[in-house]
Amino acid sequence: MAERNPIKRFFALPNDHLGKTLGFAFMVALVASVFVSVASVLLKPHYQAHLEAERQARMAEMMSLLPGMADLLAEAGVESLVVRLLDLSTGQFAEGVDAAGYDQRAAARDPATSMVLPPVADVAGIKQRANLAPVYMLRRGRALELLVLPVRGVGYQSMLYAYLALKPDGNTIAGLTVYEHGETPGIGARVEDPAWRALWPGKELTDDSGEILIEVVRGKAVGPHQVDGISGATRTGNGVSTMLRFWLGEYGFGPFLARLKAGEDLQ
């Protein structure tokens, strides 16, 4: 009498039977995918904590390299910068939102808290932009001493995440540090090199008319708006240039920086 149980019939098939081979392959793939999914969920908090620790470490490293920053922090009586959330559309600080618990990446993926960028404006290749962005500030009394802006954009092989530090005029670069990327080791990954980071302080974002000119060029830089390119990593350098061009423009921190340059009180 033929076996009616389909599972028993399946296991009774010869080991070289095509159906049995495909069936086992499917079951192994299914079990593996379940394990991967469970591991991803369980490990996500640890991964996020690691990323946050890396971000904080890179910002602290950048701060430690800025001339006189330790003295400024001591004079201001603080150990770190104050963070506030900025409405990128208006250039005004957002009220009633917890800056400490804000996840800009998650907000950029949520249609309710982000906007889809017009293709012509999306020079950084990020597609969606969160409505709010954190702004890190160091003040001495009411005077702004340092401004740090988080920026991101597509490089050659990955998304580049960086901090751009600006002096109080909102135009002179105090520092730039890329804290997360997946660029080619030994080539594009040299965006992390201290020697390349040391080229940024003192560079200027715009000319007197306000046109954004800062860029990474091939070869040696000429003038205050250019930074030396990385040999063999032209596309990574181009990614840094377009990243800055976007975040300094109207869909990024442009409206906020315009208020700063106009001398408005940004308390």
Image (cartoon, grey):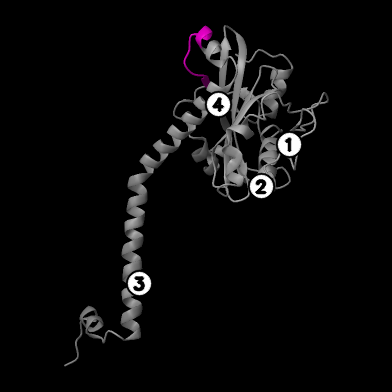
**Distance between the Cα atoms at labels 4 and 3?**
50 Å
Nearer the observer: mark 3 or 2; the answer is 2
Whether residue 105 is situated above or below residue 83 in the rendered picture: below
**Distance between the Cα atoms at labels 3 and 2?**
42 Å
**Distance between the Cα atoms at labels 3 and 1?**
51 Å
Left of 35 or right of it: where is 233? right
The numbered dot on residue 26 is 3
Q: How far across and down, in percent of the image, does residue 18 sit?
A: 35, 84
| Amino acid type, residue under disc 4 in the picture | Met
Whether residue 162 is situated above or below residue 265 in the rendered picture: below
Residue named by callout 2: 233
Residue named by callout 4: 62
Residue 118: in magenta span: no
Nearer the observer: mark 3 or 1; the answer is 1
Which callout, 4 or 3, points at the residue further toward the start of the chain?
3
Span shown in magenta:
74-84
**Are dots 4 and 1 in contact, CB under 8 Å?**
no
